[in-house]
Amino acid sequence: MAFSVNTNVGAMAALQSLNQTNKSLSTTQSRINTGMNVASTKDDSAAFAIAQTLRGDLGGLKSVGSSLSRAKSTVDVAVAGAEQISDLVNQMKAKAVEASDAGLDATSRTALAADFDGLKEQINTIIDSSEFNGTNLLKAAGGTVAALQSTDTAAATLDVANQDFTAIVTAVGATFTDAATAETMVGTLDTQAAAINTKMSTLGAASRKIEGQQTFVGKLSDVIESGIGNLVDADLAKESAKLQALQVKQQLGVQALSIANQAPQTITSLFR
């Protein structure tokens, strides 16, 4: 090996090794700080592009989840109103049955008719109040529900039709005035009670369907989020071990460079 004061090959090799160690150390520290193995397209273009696409899908699913939540709330409000109306119709039927007794005096029948009217008015109040986010599934022209089911905007929406409970109040008609009209009212209320049960079943089925779709969207979001993590998240235990090794390597590299820098000084001993 030739001795030269112009070119220190050992120092250059030691410097290159130290620079590489510092670069690896910087990368490892960045992964530990961000918790990500792929934080930029510069790290891994393919993995980063896939992760970005999945993040877009995840954002879309959050919007789908919000749409389903609004639909579920709207339907649940309608279900609560429908169940209360069903109870009121049963109470109205009880009043009508009692009023159909031919032996009942006029004063008592009038009192029953007043109670009957009060229950009917309460039904109207419930119908008007069963609104959520501007949609009322119990009121005529109150709107319908059309919720997103997936991120595919061309896919069919999850629809719930308006149940129009206003028509039920209209069908009940005028309050009974005697035993005969009270008896007729009993039959009318039986018919309307059956219609209410059908409408409640429709609303209940819609609520369960929305809830099922919400569960699926939630699980799908979890899977996608896990997939993104598998692509870009760093193994912090592994990076921690690597950090310690690189720190030791850096110290040794500094010492090696220091020794290599002192090598040309030995040439002076040849001229003594």
Image (cartoon, helix red, strand yellow):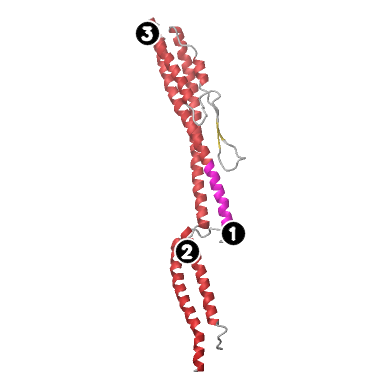
Answer few, some or many: residues within 10 Å of disc 3's Cα (few below 14, many 20 plus, some between 14 and 19): few
Among all residues in the image, which is located at the extreme bottom?
Answer: 272
Q: Where does the magenta region start and end?
A: 44-63
Q: Residue at x 40, y 14 (%)?
A: 115
Q: Residue at x 50, y 86 (%)?
A: 265
Q: Residue at x 47, y 64 (%)?
A: 29
Q: Residue at x 51, y 16 (%)?
A: 171
Assign a secondary structure to mark 3: helix
Q: Nearer the viewer, mark 3 or mark 2?
A: 2
For the question of whether residue 103 can be seen, the reply is: no
Answer few, some or many: residues within 10 Å of disc 1's Cα (few below 14, many 20 plus, some between 14 and 19): few
How far apart marks 1 and 3 lie (CA) works out to 84 Å
Q: Of 7 and 196, which appears nearest the observer? A: 7
Are the residues tagged 1 and 3 within 8 Å (C-beta)?
A: no
Residue that numbered label 1 is attached to: 45
Asked whether, in this view, residue 74 is left or right of residue 106, the answer is right
Q: Of 251 and 92, which appears nearest the observer? A: 251
Q: Which mark is residue 108?
A: 3
Among all residues in the image, which is located at the extreme front?
Answer: 272
Position in image of residue 72 (x %, y %): 49, 35
How far apart marks 3 and 2 lie (CA) works out to 87 Å
Are the residues tagged 3 and 2 within 8 Å (C-beta)?
A: no
Among all residues in the image, which is located at the extreme right?
Answer: 154
Residue that numbered label 2 is attached to: 29
